[in-house]
Image (tube, rainbow, N blue to C red):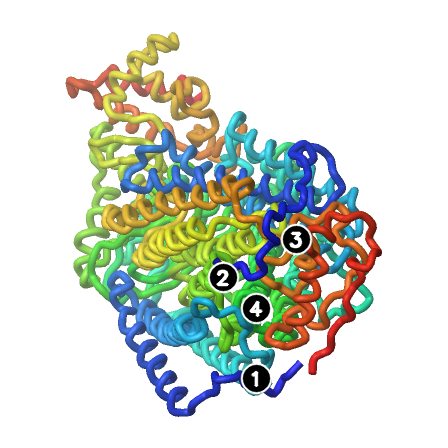
């Protein structure tokens, strides 16, 4: 057990909001953040269930489990859409909502009402997406290339468009909120480069969203008009062009990959530093590389079109795609250097972050391979690509989400997650993940395209291995769900700062009161300044100040609530 | 903050660094040795340089993999908090030299692989002399390749092209495919040749490659095109010599045009299997018909269609099987089989117009003669082997009624 600060004997967790608070309109960023996260987890289960059905179908080379090819196509279409737009992106919006204001020492987000509005768009959008199943689900893939998506996809495709529109509005509103909050609501003593790196990653993510989503929205509108109003933006027989959609779609959807990965990288910066008990290595390099990735990420989109774009235009996108490797490499080496010389505590949060590093690097390497046009010509639209982006989005994003849950669950609920269950969850997920996705490289290289329900018989053995691993992976998810449910009431009481972390979200009770902080908030001069005498003094001081008696006591400016002077090093 | 500290107790020993570097490089090399076994046989001139590029990337990737995983494992073993340890780690948070190294070295590698990939890309795209130009058509869910006779024996015949669902060629001859889609986007992919190019609705795209190893290889559709996408594959038949290609593929095709059979049933079968006079129909993409090896997934099965058509003709108040089959081709949405969706099957109309959408379904021109032959052939698909329809005159009459 890595908990260092032991709660006072007989201490109670700080009071939690009642369940009913979570079921209605609330402008408290912590309630909204939790609403986001729980909603996202619900959709994670749906998306995961669809993945299980996909893998069941692929146990045999023939189309036998799905009644028709269309039914199978709708499975992977909905799986991808749900996982991207209703699980990973909303989860990051949720954890960002909960943690960013706390890390900034703020009482709430800049626009609390807008914040609630952005969340409540998710519910009808998700309902519309799933309602596709009652009117003929979309079956053109999450990329929904026309003419297929216009001519041969159910009415659910129209709902899909409307749902994505709503989710896009939600993302834009949420992002504006993050940007304004981060710019305006820092404490006076916190400069840009004293911000926790998770905040930097949310800033980079938000910038991507407000720049990128409008393009997707424009494309979706044209697609909607082609479907319902008889226009021909993408219909070549009447002067339209199918490549226009591909360009618009990927101009948003490639940066969307960074929307899903950058917050995870932010989580890693927090988790690795705190649990290695060491300052983050190369703070500015990590912060700037987030911005670099966000920026360069807008120039690589057409590497998704290496087999459709005219050959002369492919080259610049190969160059930009390779360049992305440099800031990504900087981050990976910086995290390893952060661990180097530390006193690493291998709790579940840290395990998932290290798991991220070890798996994400494979996704990075295969990303470089796919960036090379001649190699991509062979591997484009094969299982190699499926494997690549699951190493990035599962081995990356979802591992980081798990890490963030183990790291911040104590803050959100006031209770620790069970470490034994956490380790069972980690090891089962880690190996099941690897054996689900690594063999997909091999079938792809051998010649199996993606998005097929029937495949050449020689690929069956690998597909059986993949499917069985996928079922184990699916089951492993229930370990963390059970852990969360059980620990909510039976977990060890966390206390304000179980990890002895320096960032501000830990300098208040767990869960924080609705006003977040009692008294003035004074951040430590360096959010990652572990290993110094000054940081130990600061943490000891905060621990005394945050005793249950003081936390539950009345009045915000009594002696106990006085802020300790920020300590200077040496 | 203390920038200068290199870390208490974690100083760098040059011998260990050189040793580690050697292990990482050798490991990367060993990983790259796997490269040939990961790919299917390399059957084109393009496959060689592409596989070599992959092998170099696998080496570089292997080095990165060994380096990152190695450092992670060392960190985990060396720097994990032992039982009872509650202190913090060393306080250092940067090292300019290290950060420069891990920015500059990857940048150099990126420049190298950019130049190398560019070189390979230029090489495999270079146009070859004496290319065999073949028109390829992708259509849900079938491939069709059309040829002209290289010996120009068909100059006096109304149609000078013939087609096949299999791409026939021979070793050493560069091919240029001019590709068009009749409906949605598709992608032409031959895994053994490492080449792929999308077929885009409304555009002609092309790709060149040179088969180098005789054999029969899968042609795969790699761009999602709908319900039967997974079944949209065909083959490329690579003959060892030009002579063999001429004798086994070109000559019979030419002979068929020069001396066509007169039996409508035989003509119908050929029309369905590989098209006739440059016209080919995509029926095999969706339907099952065991007699000629169709295994489509999207439409109703045509096994025993003669008997089925008889029953469906009666229940729908049509004259006979021939009437029903002709109707189903000319106006496919009229009597959609229960459980199937309108608008999926193209309409095979009697008017000679460019392929386009009519009432939400794709439109293709089908000559009356082809329709008569096809109906004659399909009428033979009965349990008894006897035609379910009348004689050729009756079938012609039925077809002509439906063609108006």
CA–CA distance in space, label 2 to label 3: 19 Å
> Residue lying furthest bottom in this view?
B14
CB atoms of marks 3 and 4 within 8 Å:
no
Residue corresponding to mark 2: A350
Residue corresponding to mark 1: B100
Residue corresponding to mark 3: A96
> Which chain does the residue under circle 1 lie in?
B
Q: Nearer the viewer, mark 2 or mark 3?
A: 2
Q: Residues within 10 Å of mark 2 (few under 14, many from 20)?
A: many
CA–CA distance in space, label 4 to label 1: 21 Å
If you read the primary sequence from the N terminus, does the residue marked by circle 4 or circle 2 appear first?
4
Q: Nearer the viewer, mark 1 or mark 2?
A: 2
- Residue shown at 36%/59% (left/top)? B133
Above/below status of A334 relative to A493:
below
Q: Mark 4 falls on what kind of element? A: helix
* Position of residue A387 measured from the top left corner of the image (x, y, whole percent): 41, 55
CA–CA distance in space, label 1 to label 2: 27 Å
- Residue shown at 32%/36% (left/top)? A63
Residue corresponding to mark 4: A273
CA–CA distance in space, label 3 to label 4: 19 Å
Horizontal relation, residue A417 to residue B371: left or right: right
CB atoms of marks 2 and 3 within 8 Å:
no
């Amino acid at each position: 057990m890595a908990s260092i600060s032991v709660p006072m004997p007989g201490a109670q967790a700080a009071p939690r909001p009642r369940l009913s608070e979570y079921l209605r309109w609330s402008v408290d960023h912590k309630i909204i953040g939790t609403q986001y996260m729980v909603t996202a987890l619900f959709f994670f289960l749906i998306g995961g269930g669809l993945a299980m059905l996909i893998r069941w179908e692929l146990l045999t080379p023939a189309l036998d489990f799905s009644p028709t090819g269309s039914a199978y196509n709708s499975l992977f279409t909905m799986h991808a859409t749900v996982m991207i737009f209703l699980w990973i992106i909303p989860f990051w919006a949720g954890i960002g909502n909960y943690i960013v204001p706390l890390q900034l020492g703020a009482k709430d987000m800049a626009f609390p009402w807008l914040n609630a509005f952005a969340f409540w768009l998710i519910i009808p959008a998700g309902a519309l997406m799933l309602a596709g199943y009652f009117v003929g689900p979309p079956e053109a893939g999450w990329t929904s290339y026309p003419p297929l998506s216009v001519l041969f996809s159910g009415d659910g495709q129209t709902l899909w468009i409307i749902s994505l529109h709503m989710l896009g509005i939600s993302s834009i509103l949420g992002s504006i909120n993050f940007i304004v909050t981060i710019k305006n609501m820092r404490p006076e003593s916190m400069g840009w480069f004293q911000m926790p790196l998770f905040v930097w990653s949310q800033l980079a993510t938000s910038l991507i969203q407000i720049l990128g989503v409008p393009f997707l929205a424009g494309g979706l509108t044209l697609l909607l008009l082609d479907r319902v109003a008889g226009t021909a933006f993408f219909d070549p027989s009447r002067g339209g062009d199918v490549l226009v959609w591909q360009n618009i779609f990927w101009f948003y959807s490639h940066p969307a990959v960074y929307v899903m990965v950058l917050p995870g990288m932010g989580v890693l910066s927090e988790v690795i530093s705190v649990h290695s008990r060491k300052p983050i290595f190369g703070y500015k390099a990590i912060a700037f590389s987030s911005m670099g990735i966000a920026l360069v990420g807008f120039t690589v989109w057409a590497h998704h079109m290496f087999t459709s774009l005219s050959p002369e235009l492919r080259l610049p996108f190969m160059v930009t795609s390779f360049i992305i490797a440099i800031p990504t490499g900087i981050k990976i080496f910086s995290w390893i250097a952060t661990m180097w010389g530390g006193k690493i505590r291998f709790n579940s949060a840290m395990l998932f972050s290290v798991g991220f590093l070890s798996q994400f690097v494979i996704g990075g390497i295969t990303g470089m391979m796919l960036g090379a046009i001649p190699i991509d010509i062979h591997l484009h639209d094969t299982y190699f690509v499926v494997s690549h982006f699951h190493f990035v989005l599962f081995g990356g994003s979802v591992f980081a989400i798990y890490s963030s849950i183990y790291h911040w669950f104590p803050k959100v609920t006031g209770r620790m997650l069970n470490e034994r269950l956490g380790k069972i969850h980690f090891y089962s997920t880690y190996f099941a993940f690897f054996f689900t996705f690594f063999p997909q490289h091999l079938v792809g290289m051998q010649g199996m395209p993606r998005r097929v329900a029937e495949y050449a018989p020689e690929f069956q053995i690998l597909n059986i291995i993949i499917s069985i691993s996928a079922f184990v992976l699916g089951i492993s998810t229930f370990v963390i769900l059970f852990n969360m449910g059980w620990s909510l009431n039976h977990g060890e009481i966390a206390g304000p700062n179980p990890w002895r972390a320096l960032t501000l979200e830990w300098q208040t009770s767990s869960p924080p009161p609705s006003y977040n902080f009692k008294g003035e908030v004074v951040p430590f001069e360096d959010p990652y300044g572990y290993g110094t005498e000054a940081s130990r003094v600061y943490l000891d001081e905060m621990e005394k100040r945050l005793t249950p008696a003081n936390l539950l006591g009345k009045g915000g400016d009594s002696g106990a609530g006085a802020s300790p002077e920020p300590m200077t090093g040496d | 903050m203390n920038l200068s500290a290199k870390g208490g107790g974690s100083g760098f020993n040059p011998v260990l660094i050189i040793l580690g570097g050697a292990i990482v490089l050798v490991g990367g090399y060993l990983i790259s040795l796997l490269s040939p076994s990961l790919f299917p046989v390399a059957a084109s001139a393009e496959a060689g340089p592409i596989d070599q590029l992959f092998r170099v990337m696998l080496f570089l990737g292997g080095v990165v993999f060994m380096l990152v995983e190695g450092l992670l494992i060392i960190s985990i073993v060396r720097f994990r908090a032992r039982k009872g340890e509650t202190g913090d780690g060393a306080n250092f948070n940067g090292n300019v030299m290290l950060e420069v190294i891990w920015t500059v070295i990857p940048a150099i590698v990126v420049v190298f692989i950019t130049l190398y990939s560019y070189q390979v890309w230029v090489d495999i795209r270079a146009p070859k002399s004496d290319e065999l130009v073949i028109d390829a058509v992708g259509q849900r869910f079938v491939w069709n390749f059309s040829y002209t006779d290289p010996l120009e024996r068909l100059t006096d015949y109304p149609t000078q092209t013939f087609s096949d669902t299999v791409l026939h060629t021979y070793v050493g001859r560069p091919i240029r495919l001019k590709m068009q889609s009749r409906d949605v986007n598709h992608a032409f992919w031959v895994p053994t040749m490492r080449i792929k190019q999308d077929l885009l609705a409304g555009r002609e795209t092309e790709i060149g490659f040179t088969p180098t190893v005789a054999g029969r290889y899968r042609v795969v559709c790699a761009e999602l095109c709908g319900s039967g996408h997974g079944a949209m594959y065909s083959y490329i038949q690579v003959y060892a010599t030009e002579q063999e290609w001429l004798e086994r593929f070109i000559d019979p095709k030419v002979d068929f045009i020069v001396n066509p059979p007169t039996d409508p049933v035989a003509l119908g079968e050929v029309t369905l299997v590989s098209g006739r006079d440059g016209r080919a129909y995509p029926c095999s993409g969706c339907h099952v018909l065991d007699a000629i090896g169709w295994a489509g997934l999207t439409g109703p099965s045509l096994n025993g269609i003669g008997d089925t058509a008889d029953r469906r003709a009666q229940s729908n108040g049509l004259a006979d099987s021939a009437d029903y089959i002709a109707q189903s081709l000319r106006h496919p949405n009229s009597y959609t089989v229960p459980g199937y969706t309108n608008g999926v099957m193209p309409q095979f109309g009697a008017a000679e117009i460019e392929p386009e959408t009519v009432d939400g379904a794709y439109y293709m021109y089908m000559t009356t003669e082809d329709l008569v032959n096809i109906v004659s052939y399909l009428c033979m698909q009965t349990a008894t082997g006897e035609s379910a329809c009348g004689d050729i005159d009756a079938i012609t009459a039925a077809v002509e009624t439906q063609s108006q």
